[in-house]
Structure formats: C-alpha cells, structure tokens
Amino acid sequence: MSEGKTDTGAGKDDKALLRVHDRELELNVLHGTMGPDAVDVRNLYRQAGVFTFDVGFTSTASCESKITFIDGEKGMLLYRGYPIEQLARYGDYLETCYLLLYGDLPTQDERARFEHEITRHTMVHEQISSFFRGFRRDAHPMAIMVAVVGALSAFYHDSTDINDPYQREVATRRIIAKVPTLAAMAYKYSLGQPFIYPRNDLDYASNFMRMCFAVPTEDYHVNPILARALDRIFILHADHEQNASTSTVRLAGSSGANPFACIASGIACLWGPAHGGANEAALKMLMEIGTPERIPEYIARAKDRNDPFRLMGFGHRVYKNYDPRARIMQQIAQEVLAEVGDPNDPLLEVARRLEEMALKDEYFIERGLYPNIDFYSGITLRALGFPTDMFTVLFAIARTVGWVAHWREMIADPQRKIGRPRQLYTGPTLRDYVPMTERGTGLSDAVHHRNDPC
Ligand code: SDX
C-alpha cells in the first residue's frame, strides 16, 4: 500500500512482471496518494493479445479520481481528504456539495454565493408539472425520478453542451437545486396532493421537508432538529467513490451524453436492491422479522446457500469492517426517534439485536459482513415521516452531488476515453446459416428449457 505518495506516475523501480503465452511483459505500477497501487494494463491487449477478467470489477480501478477515498479494511471514508465523521458532525450538506465539486471547503463568501445560486435554481419549468400527469398515482417515485430527471434535458437545452465549461457549471447547479423539488413533486403526486413550491428563505433540507409535508391550507413549520438530521443523512450519502451508480454515470458520460441523461442513468442504477434500493428492502426485512425472537430464523436463511435471502443493509463490496456511515446513522436514528416521541421503536431493537447476533456469527465474521449505511437508514427515514418507497429517492437526492462531481471530473480528464469493456466469449464458434427447410420440425430442447410464457 503506497501511503502518502503524490506521484501517480509509474515509480522508477515499480514494475509488474507478467508471463502469458510464453511471453514475459513488464507493466508499470501506478501509485496513488492513498490506497492500493494499480498495475497499468492499458496496453496489455496490444502487447499480449489477452484481456484481464474481473466480473463485478472487484480488483479493477476504472479511473483516477481525487474526490473520495475509502479504506474498507479500516472502515475509513474521506471526502476530498476530510473524514466523514467530522463533516457529518461539523458541516452541512451544501458545504459538502461545494467540497465535493470544487475540491476544498468554501470560505464564508464562497459558501454564501453557492447557497444563493442553488437556492435560486430550485424551481422547475412549470411545464414539468404536466409531465407528471402521465404517471399513475401509484407509480414508484424512483420510476418517476428516472423519467423526470432525464426529461430535464428537454427543458434546459442551454446547459447540455458538455464541452462548454460555463454550461457544465449551469447544469451542475440546476441538477443539485432541482432534484429535491422533483423528488418532492413525485411524493406529492403519489398522495394526490398539490405540488408545493420551494422557498428561498429555507435551507436545503428544510426546503425539501416543507415541499414534502406542507399543504396549501395551513402553515408548515419545519422542525429544526429533524431538518438537521436529514441534512446529516444527505452528507452521509453524498458520495462513495466508484460505486455502481457512479460508475454508471461515468460510463454514460464517457459517450458525451448530456448531464441530465447521465444523472438519470445513475438514478436507474441506484434503484437496485443490491445498491441504493437496500434501504427500502432493509426496513421491509426488519418489519417482516418483527420481533427479536424471529432473528435466528432469518440469520439461518441468510447463511443458507440455497436460500436467495440476504440480510439487507448488511455486507459491502469495499467495507470489510464497519461502514463508518452506519455508526453515524445509528446515532441519528436514536436522535430522530427521541424527537418524534418514539425512542423505543421496536424495529430499532430488532435491528440492534440482529446486528449483535450477526456480528458474533462465524459466517458473517469470516466474510467481513457488517451493517452498511442502509441498515439503520430506513428506521430513521420512516421516523422522519417518509414512506418506504421514498427512501431510495432520498438516497438519490443526496448522491446527485457525487454523481455530478464524478461526471465533471471525468469530462475534464485529459485521459478521457469512451468506456468500452471487452469480454471472455464462450458462445458458439463460427457456423453457417441453416435454411428453414433443413431445420426439422417441433420444438427444440432449448425452447423447452426456456421460461418464456408462450
Ligand atoms: C450500497 O458500492 C458502494 O459503495 C455502495 C454504497 C454507496 O454508498 O454507493 O455503499 C451503497 O449499495 C450499500 C450496499 C447495500 N446493499 C445491501 O445491503 C444488499 C445486501 N448486501 C449484499 O447484496 C452484498 O453484500 C453486496 C451487494 C452489498 C456486496 O456484494 P459483493 O461484494 O459482490 O459480495 P458477494 O455477493 O460476493 O458476497 C460475498 C459472500 C457471499 O458468500 P459466499 O459465496 O462467500 O459463501 O458474502 C455473502 C455472499 O453470499 N454475503 C451475504 C450478504 N452479503 C454478502 N450473505 C448474507 N447476507 C448478506 N447481506
């Protein structure tokens, strides 16, 4: 592990030797400032006619980045070098957005100007509200978010030229400012309630809560303790290196697609239950378990290879130690439950006991399976008043700045190339076309084994 080196070029004496098909290749080893070195295989196919094989990219660095660093063994998460624990304790979400986007904490004036810019872009084109009318009222809000965020490229043509730095900046602020408004509209639409316009005198989290929970018939006062809790939850979810949805945004952006379309692709990927959809799935799992007495049954199922059930909110591709965000989320859960008058939410007790039993079980210990950010977030978001199908939408709101920061970094990277992975092909070898008259009759075995409905 090369700690503290600033040179990302190949070290003079750092080479990796690879012997393949009786050829010996010398590959450069690249050093980061923190974390593992990387063997540079960019010329491998040209030099040796072979690919690397890495399903799920468990050992592959897809890019060079300066935004977020994770040490999975130590349970460390840094945004531009600052520990998540300090940012979540002393900072706020818009300051964190500035940090992720521009590389350092803002001065007082920079913070004020940035907040002014974001706040005054929170309204969306009025025509978008009729866009919602096409959805059923029971449409999942993530389905609506994928659609309406992508549709922003149909409304804001003047900020889709990715080669114009000014338009990239305008798109950045529009996306960060408007995603909460669209999310609140998706929620209101599902309730059959009128959309609530954003307010310029409210901070980011308070504005979102008011757009979700206010009604035109009476004043709505944001609870500052709950708004601060939500703001901290946004900080925890803001970025996380090259996770599946961020990698999706980078891959979409590498083709030159406009920023709104790229962020919509990130929302689509985040929806999966193995990724951002796990917060909704984790709460449903805790509700299904219901009582501590039933925990052993579910732990046994999670360990059973023949049972597809997994403990939702547990395990992580990178963290093989406790996800630092999960610890902070557990504290926020307790604060929110106390504030809403439900300090003894039975689900929190089920979650605690489940964590306690799993972390004593060899199966979880030897695989390095710990609670991740999604394990306690569902309990907290439910206590804040959100329905389960809005949990991943909240994750998407927070992660939007991470997606935009990585999109900007990728676009500005002089090494930028369109992402185009190869494959290990194991399909049929070359064969000639067979005329219909020579194919026989009836259904071939392949059809019987298919699950098609016909
Ligand atoms: C997020 O990448 C990110 O950074 C994501 C994220 C972010 O901020 O962007 O952190 C947000 O997505 C958090 C993860 C949320 N997902 C879940 O909580 C769903 C449940 N977790 C698992 O599906 C799983 O742990 C993953 C998907 C998170 C990670 O899967 P990996 O790294 O591909 O690990 P794996 O599936 O190869 O599992 C390794 C072993 C397997 O057992 P064996 O084959 O070795 O016998 O661990 C087992 C798995 O069966 N395992 C679990 C488990 N997670 C892994 N067994 C039971 N319950 C689980 N939750």
Image: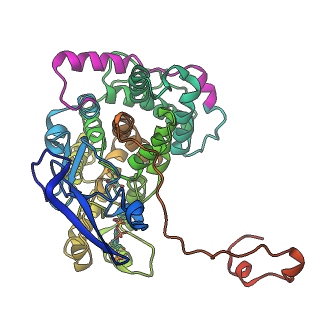
- Along the viewing direction, whichever of 161 and 249 lies nearer the viewer: 161
Q: From the top left corner, tell me how far across and down residue 447 is, in percent.
A: 73, 78
Relative side of 141 to 379, left or right: right
Answer whether residue 387 is visible to the viewer in this image: no
Instruction: Tell me if residue 109 is in the magenta stretch.
Output: yes
Residue at image coords 28%, 46%: 64
Main SS of residues in magenta: helix
Direction right: furthest residue? 437
Which portion, as a residue range, is magenta?
102-131
Q: Residue at x 31, y 77 (%)?
A: 296
Q: Where residue 438 sits: x, y (%)?
A: 86, 81
Q: Residue 264: x and y, percent?
A: 50, 40
Residue 254 or residue 127, whichever sits in front = 254
Q: Is residue 270 above or below residue 315?
A: above
Q: Quadrant of the N terminus?
A: bottom left
Does 194 appear in magenta? Answer: no
Q: Is residue 427 left or right of residue 266?
A: right
